[in-house]
Amino acid sequence: MATRIDRKIVGYKVGDTEQDGETAAAATPAAAEPQAEDNVVQLHEKLERPEMLIGSTYKVKTPLSEHALYVTINDIVLNHGTANELRRPFEIFINSKNMDHFQWIVALTRIISAVFRKGGDVTFLVEELRSVFDPRGGYFKKGGKYMPSLVAEIGDAIECHMRMIGLLKDDGLDEHQKKLVAEKRAQFEAASGSAALGEDCGSEFPAGAQLCIKCHTKAAVKMDGCLTCLNCGESKCG
């Protein structure tokens, strides 16, 4: 219906009650979506430490000392109870009766804790620590795994914890590789006798096995003229 205007226009406004209501309702979900994303808490160095943290303690026994090291890693849980819930390492403590390494261990734990609290990808710490070699030589753990230094042992404990909380994925052998390793072990046992296994300090690998360059385990034996690892299946013959 047309309306005649016979006075001077001093102002105007275009509006529709029904359209305004629909526009507001349509805009509400769009505004709520980025707001939900903004509520996701990320780990960063300014995040305050909660009063209580959950964690795990790992016992590290080495032939370098009669006293064990106890590595405690505490985690912070971000976005608890939501779809974005994450458990991330927040701090690390190392305790032992042996005070010979006290000074550098305290320094190391403070640096690692600072890296944890910085946020981002902290998985690089594992490789950095495990690549530290003791000039006096390393040692073999129970099971035949070679540890080049005490620092590498600490890195191994951190890797174990990161796998436990899901920060590192388990890159173990697939079914085909497991089948291949089982076949190689069966062939070696048939050729040399099962008594040759498990004689080296409780290891499940042969006493005369050599160190595998891939998995760093004393499990490489000579089969068909070339070295074959009975732990990971690595072979010089392909």
Image: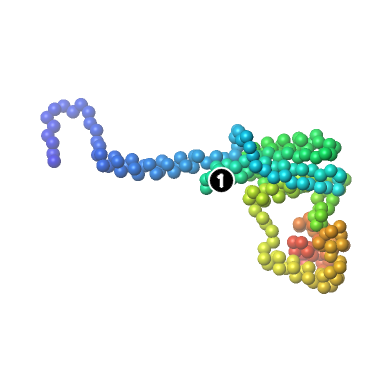
- Residue 210 visible? The answer is no
In the displayed structure image, the side of residue 159 where residue 34 appears, left or right: left
Instruction: State which quarter of the image contains the C terminus.
Output: bottom right
Q: Amino acid at mark 1?
A: Glu
Q: Could you say whether the residue bearing mark 1 is in a helix, strand or loop?
A: loop
Percent position (x, y) of residue 127? Answer: 72, 47
In the image, 147 versus 227, the foreground residue is 147
Q: Residue at x 84, y 69 (%)?
A: 194
In the displayed structure image, the side of residue 56 where residue 27 appears, left or right: left
In the image, 12 versus 151, the foreground residue is 151
| Residue corresponding to mark 1 | 85
Instruction: State which quarter of the image contains the N terminus.
Output: top left
Q: Please determine whether, in this image, residue 148 is positioned above or below residue 97.
A: below
Q: Residue at x 60, y 33 (%)?
A: 48
In the displayed structure image, the side of residue 151 where residue 12 appears, left or right: left
Residue density around tag 1, few if under 14, some if 14–19, many if 20 or more, within 10 Å: few
Percent position (x, y) of residue 20? Answer: 29, 40
Q: Residue at x 46, y 40 (%)?
A: 35
- The picture quadrant where one finds residue 205 is bottom right
Percent position (x, y) of residue 8? Answer: 16, 27
Q: Please determine whether, in this image, residue 228 is positioned above or below residue 109.
A: below
- The picture quadrant where one finds residue 219 is bottom right
How was the colour assigned to the protein in this rendering? rainbow
